[in-house]
Image: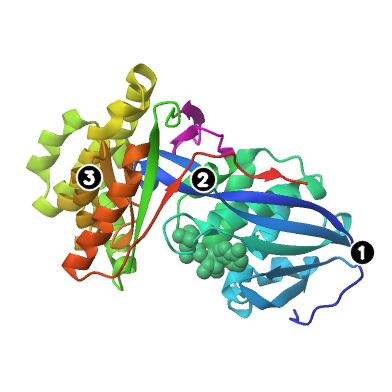
Amino acid sequence: MSTTPVSTGTLTTGVWSGPGRVNLIGEHTDYNDGFVFPFAIEYRTSVALAVRDDGRIRVSSSFDPEPVEVALADLAGLFPDRRDEVIEWARYPLGVAWALLEATGADVASVTGVDLTFTSDVPVGAGLSSSAAIESATAAALNDVWGLGLDRVALARAGRRAENEAVGAPTGIMDQMASLLGRADAGTFLDCRSLEAEVVDLGFAPAGLELLVIDTKVTHAHSTGGYGERRAACERGAAIMGVAALRDLSVDDLPRAQELMDDVTFRRVRHVVTEDQRVLDAVATLRSDGPRAIGPLLDASHVSMRDDFEISVPELDLAVETARAAGAIGARMTGGGFGGAAIALIDHELVGPATAAVEAAFVDAGFAAPHIFTVHPSEGARRDS
Ligand code: ADP
Ligand code: MG
């Protein structure tokens, strides 16, 4: 591979984009074969695609002045074993191209070379999945231009494979599904075992509600170890209960689990089992009573992550408590934990006062200033022009 751009004088064929996402409820349930309920947001990564006639793929991004270029025929040799030869950000789009070719068995000689130029307004590392945004934009563009005919679930699988094997990040498929299946004003209720997804109306706007994101900007050094420890505890709990995954347990099984396990393993299990139930309850409650009724489920999700799964941090707890005190109808940390963002469901007219209250509370506590903004359920990856 080379990093020297070789322009063949191509024309832009089109522009596609993929959104970031926020997880409304369902945390650490995806790798337990359970349920999640994220939605795509209005922050997007766009890709301008130009075809080229030399069988090569070049990616460039506003993040990095240096483009990366490789022959399509060489992708199969690069991933996963020689991925370290590719600068990390470029592994996302090149990994998606590789995964799509692998998934379809397409002959590289039969697909056109491409230049992919990315721009994005998705905040990176804020728990809004800029990684899924770049993956879904790439997958949607190449699926169209290469005429692969893959459905959205297949594109999501390619995105996950890119992230797991080309980048080397052990993530589930929630982010890619949310980014590819999003609809305006709706969430994606996803069964992480069957990958069946349902679009569920959220009705925030008609109810006068906003979803506030409070990015604490905290990143904890032990998040990787903490994530691994939580995953291991979940596997241990499932093995003790004799089930394939914690998804196979219900809240009725918890008393027996408590008898069989040590306290820490039991509390990890209790979080996952009750969180799965909260996702199901949130979907049912939205349908029966509308978005104002889901507040207590968001609050309970936070308490469970704070006390049972033990993945919150003081900044997240303060964000949640202050937003609640400022009138939010529900609030919780979102994402993997040990830092990142909290979300709060709140009346439109309380956004300003709640933002000010959280900012003031962070000053009082001596914490770094958070970044606070609203997000709106938006359309998934699409062709824009
Ligand atoms: P996030 O929570 O934002 O998904 P990740 O660590 O999973 O955080 O993914 C962020 C990484 O994805 C970035 O460090 C970069 O490598 C890559 N990335 C995301 N968006 C872009 C972009 N527009 N251009 C280049 N790389 C990007
Ligand atoms: Mg990510």
Residue 103: tell me if it is visible. Answer: no
Location of residue 49 with respect to 103 vertically, above or below: below
Q: Which numbered disc covers residue 313?
A: none
Residue 4 location in percent, x, y? Answer: 78, 82
Left or right of 334, for residue 202 = right
Q: Is residue 302 visible?
A: yes
Mark 1 or mark 3, which is nearer the start of the sequence? 1
Q: Quadrant of residue 249?
A: top left
Task: Find numbered disc 1 in the image and state the secondary structure of the residue it sits on.
Answer: loop
Circle 3 sits on which residue?
326
Disc 3 is placed on an element classified as loop
Residue 97 image offset from top left, x and y in percent? 70, 58
The disc placed on residue 41 is 2
Please say if 273 is above or below 363.
above
Identity of the residue drawn at 58% across and 47% down = 157
Q: Which residue is mark 1?
A: 53
Residue 230 relative to residue 172: left or right: left
Residue type marked 1? Asp
Q: Which quarter of the rendering shows the N terminus?
A: bottom right
Packing grade of label 2 (10 A; few <14, some 14-19, many >=20) is many
State whether residue 94 is above or below residue 324. Answer: below
Taking the spot 67% from the left edge, 38% from the top edge, the residue there is 151
Q: Which residues are magenta?
A: 181-201
Please name whichever residue, 345 or 253, is drawn nearer the observer in this view of the structure. 345
Residue at (59%, 70%) from the top-left corner? 89
The reply to whether the magenta stretch includes residue 190 is yes
- Residue 20 shown left or right of residue 218 in the figure: right
